[in-house]
Image: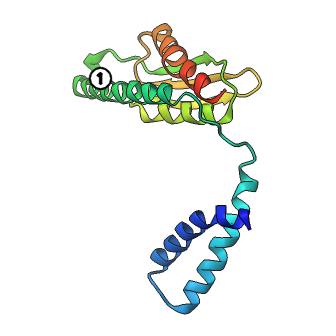
Amino acid sequence: MKRLLRALPLACLLLILWLVLNDSLSAGHLILGAVIALALALLAPILRPVRARLSHPLTALRLAGHVAADIARSNRDVGLLILRGARSGARPGFLDIPLRIRDPHGLATLACIVTFTPGTVWAGHDPDSNVLTLHVLDLSDPQGLTRIIQDRYERPLMEIFE
């Protein structure tokens, strides 16, 4: 019963999504949508066996502030690169960054941070060597970017998730 109660919010959300996508409130859609939504909500925990434990909420808020500022700064920098065109002297390239973080939730959060920041894209991660590969629009300071990823993002994520 406890498991069913925990699954209800997700099941309700899935049912609403089903009804909106089908653009119908017919009895058939309600019943079919409810059955599918409840089955998926009950099966969802199997797909996510590792539970996230969020510790240090103040660190998470500080990290969110840093990320927001970095995204704004990066938007400005990428905009200037685009406006200057070939005169900008941008040197795109790939950068390998060794990581210490191992938590899958922390790695997923780092992937989101990197991808949300204009000018950088998460290009790969080797789980054996724990090396992150980034594609960077302007790789003029690889050591600085490595320091930012490791100190400004990875360290707080390790504090939050590990």
Q: How is the image coloured?
A: rainbow
Q: Residue furthest left?
A: 83
Q: Choose top left, top right, bottom left or bottom right for residue 7.
A: bottom right
Between residue 87 and residue 125, name the one nearer to us.
125
Q: Secondary structure at mark 1?
A: helix
Q: Position of residue 37 (x, y in %)?
A: 62, 72
Q: Residues within 10 Å of mark 1 (few under 14, many from 20)?
A: some
Q: Residue furthest bottom?
A: 27
Q: Quadrant of residue 15?
A: bottom right
Q: Write down the quadrant of residue 118 in the picture.
A: top left
List x then y, in percent, for residue 74. Answer: 34, 25
Q: Could you tell me which residue is drawn at 68 percent across and 30 percent down?
A: 103
- Left or right: where does residue 98 sit relative to residue 58? right
Of residues 147 and 152, the one nearer the viewer is 152
**Where 142 falls versus 123 (above or below)?**
above
User: Closest to the observer: 151 or 6?
Assistant: 6
> In the displayed structure, does residue 16 sit left or right of residue 88?
right
Q: Which residue of the protein is positioned furthest toward the front in this rendering? A: 2
- x, y percent for residue 81: 28, 23
Q: Which percent across, then down, holds residue 17?
A: 50, 70
Q: Eyeballing the image, is 101 above or below 108?
A: above
Quarter of the N terminus within the rendering:
bottom right
Please report the residue visible at 75 percent of the width from the left and 47 percent of the height from the top.
49
Q: Which residue is mark 1?
A: 77
Amino acid bearing label 1: Asp
Quarter of the picture holding the C terminus: top right
Out of 93 and 107, give the one closest to the viewer.
Answer: 107
